[in-house]
Structure formats: structure tokens, C-alpha cells
Amino acid sequence: MSMKAPYREPLVPVEPGPRVVPEPRRRGEDGGGECGVCTGFAADAVWSDEHFSLHPPRTCSLPGTVWIASREHVDSFRDLSPEAQAAFGPLVARLEDAMLADPDVARVHLYRWGDGGAHFHAWLMPRPLGMVEASGMMLPLWEDVLPNVPDDECRAAAEKVAARLEV
């Protein structure tokens, strides 16, 4: 398999900028703006249970992309209640099965970035069947440069994933 960046060569490495200490506050932290999950700014959930809610992104280029948010306002996986921690793995497994039920999905990638908002959330992105250049860490780069599809298409794909969770 050959991963490939979605950019023309040559890419030129750049030096990182100066470190910013203290770091800027994230959304949901004191002084960092409101939490999008708690204030309802995030797209409405397509599924939820007592521990998590499932959302489509506001914009996406890979329909079927979803993100899980904890119902508890906590920063990280380590801060979740033991019950939510125990529920996370089985939920991710069920989501992967639901996403792989789409015959156009080859793999499901799970990502957790913690820099935007101070509310635990993780992303699941479907790698389209045959799109081997987007393997591994290249998938979010490709997702960023591919043309976005309409939000209602992203939502409809997320609703299909959610419906498969109920089966």
C-alpha cells in the first residue's frame, strides 16, 4: 500500500514557530470561549445514550465521518467516569461495524485530537474503498483538501451509521 500526501512535490519542511507559553485557552475552558457541545453549536446528534452522543461534522468531504462526544463535560479520556470509559471501546467497535457495513468503506480510522475544544470527543473517518493513497495518517490530510459535500449529505450518511447501531 502506498500512502501519498494530497500535495504536489516538492514539499518543503519549515521550522516550527516560537513556542506559545502559556498556551491559548481552548473552547470550554475558562477564558477560552463556550463549549460547542454544551452550548448546542455542534451539529445535532444523530444518536445518543447515557454516556455519548454521535454527531456528523458541520462540513465534510468524506460522508460517513462522525464524531463521538462524551455527555460528561470532561477534557480527556482519563477524566471520563469509569462507566463511560468502559462503554467507549464497545461503542467504537459497534461504530466501526456500522461504518464498514457500507460497501464503499475499506477501513475506519479513529482519531482523537485535544487542541480545539476542552470536551472529550473522538473522530471516526471512513477510508473509501480503493483510495489507498489516503491510508493511515494521510486520511485526514485528504479529507481536508477534497471538496466538501453538502451538509445534508454528511448528515444523511451519519444517520445511516446511527441506524446501523440500533440493529
Image (cartoon, helix red, strand yellow):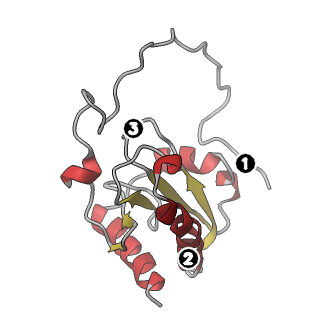
Q: Find residue 114 and report its horizontal and vertical position in percent.
A: 47, 40
Q: Find residue 131 and report its horizontal and vertical position in percent.
A: 65, 60
Amino acid at dot 2: Arg
Where is residue 63, by image quadrant? bottom left
Within 10 Å of disc 2 (Cα), the crowding (few <14, some 14-19, many 20+) is some
Q: Which residue is mark 2?
A: 94
Residue 116 - label: 3
Q: Find residue 122 and report its horizontal and vertical position in percent.
A: 48, 54
Within 10 Å of disc 1 (Cα), the crowding (few <14, some 14-19, many 20+) is some
Q: CA distance from mark 3 to mark 2?
A: 26 Å
User: Which label's residue is closer to the chain start, 2 or 1?
Assistant: 1
Q: CA distance from mark 1 to mark 3?
A: 27 Å
What residue appears at the point 56 percent right and 51 percent down from the top-left corner? 111
Q: Is residue 73 left or right of residue 103?
A: left
Q: Which residue is mark 1?
A: 3
Q: Is residue 36 left or right of residue 124?
A: left
SS category of the residue bearing label 1:
loop
Q: Residue furthest right?
A: 1
